[in-house]
Amino acid sequence: MYKLYNVKAWGSMGVHFLLEEMAVPYTNIWMTAEQVAAPEYRELSPLGYIPALGLDDGSTLFESAAIVSFLVTAHPEQGMAPQPGSNEFGEFLTWLHFMSTNLYVAYNIGDAASFYARNPAEEAFLLGKSIEKGNQLWAILAKRLEAEGPWLMGEKFSALDLYAFMLCCWSRPKETVLHAQFPAIAELAKAVRARPKLKAALEAHGVMEPRS
Ligand SMILES: N[C@@H](CCC(=O)N[C@@H](CS)C(=O)NCC(=O)O)C(=O)O
């Protein structure tokens, strides 16, 4: 059985939603920020990042996009991604990595502004830049949804939509502002929130409603 190292409203949300949608057996290991920061957790996730996914053989995966790619290919029958090896799967991976290496990182920079900045003015500047960058990236995702939607892979709901939803929950200054700016993203978030299999996980992370 998989073990998901999980923190409320952190980067484990996307994997948690995916496990729920796929209905594969797993256990949540709910962690506190202190447990995540402890040296023991770095034995599992070298940067001390959430999410991490424990496998049956005792090994642990980290990096959210890697975990999502692993799960959708380990359980292709759950239909949460196109057929592995197909051109569409390449497209799926492209957009997954677009989100994890650009949008997630824009949020990471905003979250760690005090680490990168030398003074409060620089910190505010970095936070502003992370929002600006995030908006550029959301505009690209919104354009794709407008052209190909309702889901990021077109007619077919996939793990990409869950991942995008997780990122949407973190948007600054708040999710409702992002929705007002990008109606296609608002529609995606609404549709994800309406998925019956996600009810308990949405509640567990406190993201049933957009942050306003
Ligand atoms: N590239 C990583 C980023 C993960 C990440 O930034 N996780 C945050 C929570 S959203 C975290 O665990 N932060 C703890 C820390 O910075 O010490 C991924 O995609 O999994």
Image: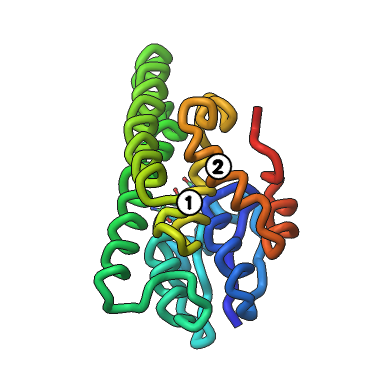
Establish whether ligand 1 lies closer than 8 Å to the Cβ of label 1.
no
- Look at the image and tell me in which quarter the N terminus lies: bottom right
Residue at 67 percent of width and 44 percent of height: 207
Please give the name of the residue rendered at 57% of the width and 32% of the height, measured from the top-left corner. Answer: 175
In the rendered image, which quarter contains the C terminus?
A: top right
Judge the density around disc 1: few (<14), some (14-19), many (≥20) Cα neighbours within 10 Å.
Answer: some
**Element on which disc 2 rests:** helix
Compared to residue 125, the image places residue 26 above or below, namely below
Quickly name the residue at label 1. 150
**Residue positioned 45% across, 60% down in the render:** 155
- Cα separation between marks 1 and 2: 8 Å
Closer to the camera, 155 or 1?
155
The three-letter code of the residue at mark 2 reads Glu
Q: Is residue 34 left or right of residue 158?
A: right
User: Is residue 49 among what the camera can see?
Assistant: no
Please report contact status of discs 1 and 2: CB closer than 8 Å, yes or no: yes
Residue 87, given in percent of the width and then of the height, sits at 25, 71
| Residue at the disc numbered 2 | 187
Q: Which of 123 and 142 is in front in this view?
A: 142
Instruction: Assign a secondary structure to mark 1.
Output: loop
Q: Could you say which quadrant of the image residue 118 lies in? A: top left
* Res 21 → quadrant: bottom right
